[in-house]
Amino acid sequence: MNLKKYDVIVAGGGTAGIAAALGAAREGASVLVIEKNAYLGGTAASGLPFIDFFNRDGKQVTAGIAEELMQRLFSERAALGHIRTQGGHLNSVTMIDPEWVKISAEEMLLESGCSILYHTFVCAADVEGGCLNSITAANKNGLTKFHAGCFIDTTGDGDLAKFAGARYSTGRESDGLCQAMSLLFKLGDVDVEKASALFSENPIVACPIGGDHAYNLHISGNLSRWDDVILKENLFPHGGHNIWAGTMRENELTYVNTVRVSEKNGADAWELSEAEIEGRRQMKKIIRFLNAHVPGMEKAHITSVPNGIGVRETRRVEGEYILTMDDVLQGRKFEDCIAKNGYCIDIHDPKGNGWGVTHIQSEDHCYDIPYRCIVPRRIDRLLVAGRCISATSEALASARIMPSCMALGQAAGAAAAISAEKKICPREVPVREIQAALRKGGAWI
């Protein structure tokens, strides 16, 4: 195995990984991003929109690299911009073109001097005396060992942290079950104006790219009017199922989110494979149901499916601080704040019985995420960012959204660069230096 060296290595090129790599590179670090797919973007490359850059009062709480990516997409006519919503549980929605996410994110990393290694995943870690010294990655070249001054786990599932021996929890505290997964898909030949007229929750009124007038581009609601069909055809195990879908371009639904796969652990290869199979089984039935029963979708057909089912929750790495449900709901503030979030607690029942939300109750409708949540308690030279941060299951149900993940990634990148430059452990990096770097990078903390 060859030994490759960098200042900072980012494992995972999803939304958190993109921001982590840019955050580190812009602080002068040499950066390698290791990504299992053939592209960057993760969940953003599935077509799912960015939600809640804003709180319920209409104040933007996330900016920095996340906002920079949105602006680049907008300039490419690949995003509609932030649209405030009324009613429902969302505060804002930012529709994006998933294929342009892959292009723009890659351009941003290359412009910043980052190296990108696709078709590669971390499979082992070398730890001595509680310090992560190197990782082993697998790809078509075989096994390669990489060394860095600091590593960042943005795999979503905490894979690197797990291989390094970090403590973690999986799923909810009562039984270890994780939130239900969703397989998104894209539909062509849809009369979006006609179809969305049936769903009034969280309307997003705008003119789609390619269109000539504004209408509701967001399908968000309940399918209970078709419960008899749903139960007869065994689409879902219960009535009252929800659908979320939306677009930024005429005659397509960029994403449809209604598949629900429950009681599977996305951090287990066998169970993840079973979830993928079940997701496609449901998808086949759903498209036939939409063709037959939803006006405007008579001619709809699947044009693409993301490279992997959407996983909401798996491992949560134990950090110096564990973000709690009370922290979220009370809008708690921390001196070592590195990110803010205004999204509600949104739990898709692990047993598949629907979903529910609980709103933040503080006057400013947002909370801080402290630096200690991305610093693993037992392992040095490692940071985590994204949905594998140190949090309870309930708190993660809020912090897992993409703007929050990007804010955390940007902070992890800045901290890792400082750690590598000064040759100190991430837990020893002065928080004020991280916060200064974040402010310089346009983040709002």
Image (tube, grey):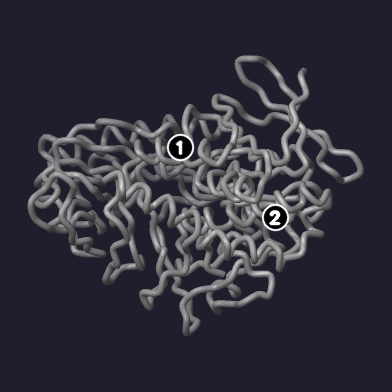
User: In the figure, residue 415 lies in which quadrant?
Assistant: bottom right
Residue drawn at the location 83% of the way across and 52% of the way down:
424
Question: Which element carries disc 2, helix, strand or loop?
Answer: helix
Image quarter of residue 155: top right
In the image as oriented, which residue stretches furthest toward the right?
A: 129
Residue neighbourhood size for the residue with mark 1, other residues' Cα within 10 Å, grouped as few (<14), some (14–19), many (≥20): few
Determine whether 155 is above or below 332 in the image: above
Name the residue rendered at 55%, 79% in the picture: 330
Q: Quadrant of the C terminus?
A: bottom right
Q: Is residue 256 in view from this perspective?
A: no
**Dividing the picture into quarters, in which one does residue 411 lie?**
bottom right
Pointer 2: what residue? Answer: 415
> Could you tell me residue 89's position as x and y percent?
36, 67
Out of 270 and 436, give the one closest to the viewer.
Answer: 436
Expressed as whole percent of the image width and height from the top left, the position of residue 366 reads 50, 74
Where residue 113 sits: x, y (%)? 58, 37
Picture disc at residue 21: none
Q: Is residue 194 left or right of residue 82?
A: left
Is 103 left or right of 1, judged from the image as shown? left
Identify the residue at image location x=41%, y=40%.
104
Query: Disc 1 marks which residue?
Result: 107
| Residue 369 position in % (x across, y down) | 61, 66
Q: CA distance from mark 1 to mark 2?
A: 23 Å
Which amino acid does the dot numbered 2 rest on? Ala
**Residue situated furthest top in the rendering:** 141
